Amino acid sequence: MKKIGNFVCKNKWIILIISLILVIPAIIGYNKTRVNYDILVYLPRDIETLKGEKILTDDFHMGSFSIMIVENMADDDLLKLEDKIRDIDGVGNVISINDITGTTIPIEMLPNNLRDKVVKGNSKLVLTTFEDSTSADRTLDAVQKIRDTVDERVKVGGMSAMVLDTKELFNSQMLLYVIVAVICCIIVLMISLDSYTVPFLLISNIGLAILYNMGTNIFFGDICYITKAIAAVLQLGVTTDFSIFLYHKYEAAKKKYKNDKNKAMSEAISETLTSVLGSSLTTIAGFLALCTMKLTLGVDIGLVMAKGVLFGLICVITIFPSLLLVFDNLIEKTKHKEFIPKFKHVTDFVIKYNKVLFVVFLLLLFPAYIAQSKTKVYYKLDTSIPDNYGYTIATKTLQEKYDMMSQSMILLDKDVEDYKISEMVDEIKELEGIDTVINPNALSGFGISDMIIPSKLKNAYQTDKYKMVIVTSKYDVATDELNDQVEKMNKIVDKYDKSAIVAGEGPLMKDLVNTTAIDLRNVNFTSILVIFIIMVFVLKSITLPILLVTAIECAIFINMGVPFVMGTTIPFIASIVIGTIQLGATIDYAILLTTRYLEERKKGNDKNVAIKTALESSVSSIFVSGMCFFGATFGVGVVSTIDMIGALCRLIARGAIISMLIVILTVPSLLLMFDGVITKTTSGFKKGKILNEKTN
């Protein structure tokens, strides 16, 4: 460890120059990394609905579609508009009722049951298909060009429109997230550190680590917008305490080596690396546990954040020491009195009422667990899009005028007889909540002669391998009603074609619900198990990992139970990842306190003396770490209008505070209550007696 410290001190200028040079490829990598705004692409590739999406893309050239609402437009103008849209790169088919009637046959002559499905007053529906997938760049570009082509009389809906609006909304706020997080952290650091210069050096160091992390994401090909939004603020919040620890060690070592700053820094680096290695491993392990999710968004977040912690640790023992040494004189000139209190009253309170706090902890544990299990989550991906965005306007118009909430596509083998398809359609129509079932065969039932149906319309429904039936529902996506409807539809379809697939947004969202239900159990179990194993080796104890993980899990239960108590609903992704993030990021607080407690006990001090010393030396550090974590995420939670991001950041921020309070108020009581068991199950103690125990 000392060799690393000596190397850094000797080559501080070289390290700073290299770190600045590395900014160039990092920025290039950051800009070149594609950002994905469609969460559904992270579903497991082997599920049937995604196989259906591939068939729609490859065979029907319908990777995505948009139902547009056209108002107050003459028939000939509508047909001209269709031609313009067809010429846009990425667009497949553009179909409306006018493709059947043209400009000569009055729409009023069509059967009422057909006309009412596609015409309402002065508005008509136009189906536009796209050749590539929902979130493909070519598709998003096509949607944007359609919006640029049409005027206010045309409203463009569909999943790709939602993804495009999410992209625009996110890009308009991303810079604000970073600015708010940095300002909040600087405020906390200004209050907690004894120099006005150090906070800026610390933020600069972490900023470089974040830039390196985000730049190397180019090797993944693309990352989710949620990952991009939270990675920077999480890395800032999680790794700040590494830098604070190093600074404090450096300041203490300077008093020991008054005339040799390099030697002081070398010792500080060595002690920091030894101390934070274990805690960083638990944090990294917590994030990597997300990689066990079937929804591969977990892999996305887990790898990026684990890499971020690693970059943070490397920068803390290389770049930050170099900055401190170079700017040491300025640091000394800008020293000020520390504003953080010593928390003596808190220490006295915890020791005096440790048994009461232990009882309160036990009383909270079970109700908190019940409350968090009842917290409601939502899966609607468009919840965060404001009312004045194009997708929301189109969707509301579609719902209000046409009572159409969602669409599904049934993909059948081409050899399925037409009469069987008609029977299947009749059964599906009987399901509660079904709006319309459309296929070329059904058009004759509306009184439309096969002779006048355009070939492009026929080709849109049939290929040399498959036939397609479109089903529209009155139920909204990600609701229990629609999920139940899709389930019943699958059973009906299966009777007529065992190989058939029900695809589309509704079935995809149903699979998302089922997948995340499994992930919630698996990820939490994996993170607890992995972190427990690491803590066994870090603390050299069997009992302590159980106690500390239980304490943080209680904090997680309380945090996740708050939405239930407040009657609010949280995004599904928050319910899956928050437990792992909070456990991995805040278990360090408990490890810091416990490690110091063990040191004092092994010196032969009484358990009450040991816990008092541990609290006095750790509370300030835990408070600063917790507040930095809170500051980095809370600000983003407040300013973000994308609830998928805002709600997640608010949960993380609240979790940081709750974990901090649990560690300060409850962990000491656990250590005192189970001291006898701890000394028997922890390395360094022998037969329940403290090694080198002091004699009175």
Image (tube, rainbow, N blue to C red):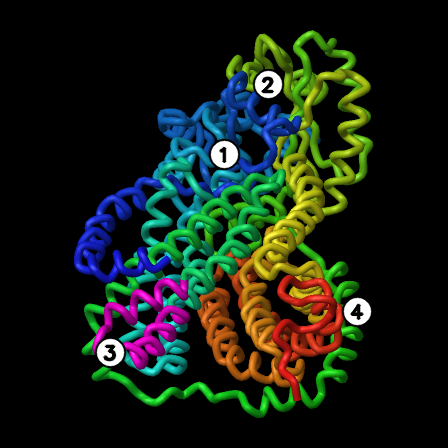
Q: Residues within 10 Å of mark 3 (few under 14, many from 20)?
A: some
Looking at the rendered structure, which numbered label has been put on residue 134? 1
Image spot of residue 392 (x, y percent)? 52, 50
Which residue position holds label 2? 461
Image spot of residue 278 (x, y percent)? 51, 58
Q: Residues within 10 Å of mark 1 (few under 14, many from 20)?
A: many
Query: In the image, which is nearer the foreground, mark 3 or mark 1?
Result: 3
Q: Amino acid at mark 1?
A: Thr
* Count of numbered tags: 4
Secondary structure category for the residue under label 2: helix
Which residue position holds label 3? 331
Secondary structure category for the residue under label 3: helix
Image spot of residue 314 (x, y percent)? 36, 54
Query: In the image, which is nearer the foreground, mark 4 or mark 1?
Result: 4
Q: Nearer the viewer, residue 422 or 691?
A: 691
In the image, the segment drawn in magenta is: 244-272
Q: Amino acid at mark 3?
A: Ile
Secondary structure category for the residue under label 4: helix
